[in-house]
Structure formats: structure tokens, C-alpha cells
Image: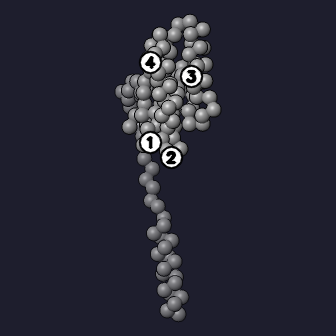
């Protein structure tokens, strides 16, 4: 009888301690916060080049050739650098507003794609938002 009582009390104690008490809270949107939320909307970039890592850091040789091309380009396209990983992962986000002719724009993007061809640690996105935030 003592064993049954002990077992029943342990089971009831376990059941009551596992219940979580969640408080439901209402959030009221403040009209003054809408202006700040509009300012925080992400920007869409024409080209995003992400160098990722799979445990040993990103491909440094590809990063060097990529930066040599972009920094040496005659139109000097501006980009935002976002370092986001612990192993040197980085995104380069381009608006490409400096490349006014369609020929220059397509040529630049195609060359960047050739740099990253065959490498699964380089992700090239077009007309997207930068996913990562700076650390």
C-alpha cells in the first residue's frame, strides 16, 4: 500500500510540475511606432554574393579574386559588406546603381557568376534582401 501511495504521489507531482503557465498578453500598436517600423524595412539589392563556410571558413582565394574584380572595376560599384559568421562568413550586397547601361550590368553579374561557378560555398542572389545582419 505504501508503494502505491508513493508511486501515485510521484506521478501527480510530475504531472503538475510539467504544466506551463503562459500569460496571454495583448500588444497594442502605437501609431508613433509605425514611422520607425517603416524606416527599418529592409532594402532590396540587385546582387548579393554570400561566402559561406562548412566548417573550415570560406574560400579565401575566391574572395580575393572577387574583391580584385569588384574593386578594380572601372565603374567602381559600391557594396555593403556584412560579416555575419564565426568563421569569416560574409555577404556583399550591391545595388549596382553605378552601372547604367544594361550591357555593363549584365556583364558584371555574369562575371561574378563565373567566379562562383562550381563552388558550393558561394551563393549568388539577385533582386533580394540581405538575410544576415552585422554582428
Q: Compare marks 2 and 3 and give the one earlier in the sequence.
A: 2
At which x and y percent is residue 41? 45, 26
At which x and y percent is residue 62? 52, 30
At which x and y percent is residue 15? 51, 71
In the image shown, does 72 or 44 lie closer to the viewer?
72
Q: Compare marks 1 and 3 and give the one earlier in the sequence.
A: 1
Q: In this view, does 80 lie above or below 134?
A: above
Residue at disc 1, secondary structure? loop
Give the residue drawn at x 45%, y 69%.
17
Q: Is residue 55 above or below residue 89?
A: below
Are circles 2 and 3 on residues that touch, CB within 8 Å?
Answer: no
Q: Compare marks 1 and 4 and give the one earlier in the sequence.
A: 4
- Mark 2 → mark 4, Cα distance in angstroms: 28 Å
Q: Compare marks 4 and 3 and give the one earlier in the sequence.
A: 4
Instruction: Provide the residue designation for mark 1.
Output: 87
- Mark 2 → mark 1, Cα distance in angstroms: 8 Å
Q: State the mark number for residue 71.
A: 4
Give the residue drawn at x 48%, y 64%.
19
**Which residue appears farthest toward the top when viewing the image?**
101
Amino acid at each position: 500500500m505504501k508503494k502505491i501511495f508513493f508511486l501515485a504521489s510521484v506521478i501527480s507531482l510530475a504531472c503538475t510540475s510539467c504544466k506551463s503557465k503562459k500569460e496571454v498578453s495583448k500588444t497594442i500598436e502605437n501609431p508613433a511606432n509605425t514611422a520607425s517600423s517603416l524606416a527599418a524595412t529592409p532594402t532590396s539589392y540587385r546582387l548579393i554574393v554570400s561566402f559561406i563556410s562548412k566548417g573550415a571558413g570560406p574560400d579565401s582565394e575566391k574572395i580575393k579574386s572577387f574583391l580584385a574584380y569588384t574593386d578594380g572595376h572601372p565603374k567602381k560599384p559600391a557594396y555593403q559588406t556584412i560579416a555575419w559568421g564565426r568563421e569569416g562568413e560574409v555577404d556583399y550586397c550591391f545595388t549596382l546603381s553605378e552601372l547604367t547601361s544594361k550591357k555593363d550590368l549584365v556583364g558584371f553579374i555574369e562575371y561574378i557568376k563565373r567566379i562562383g561557378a562550381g563552388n558550393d560555398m558561394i551563393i549568388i542572389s539577385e533582386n533580394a534582401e540581405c538575410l544576415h545582419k552585422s554582428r
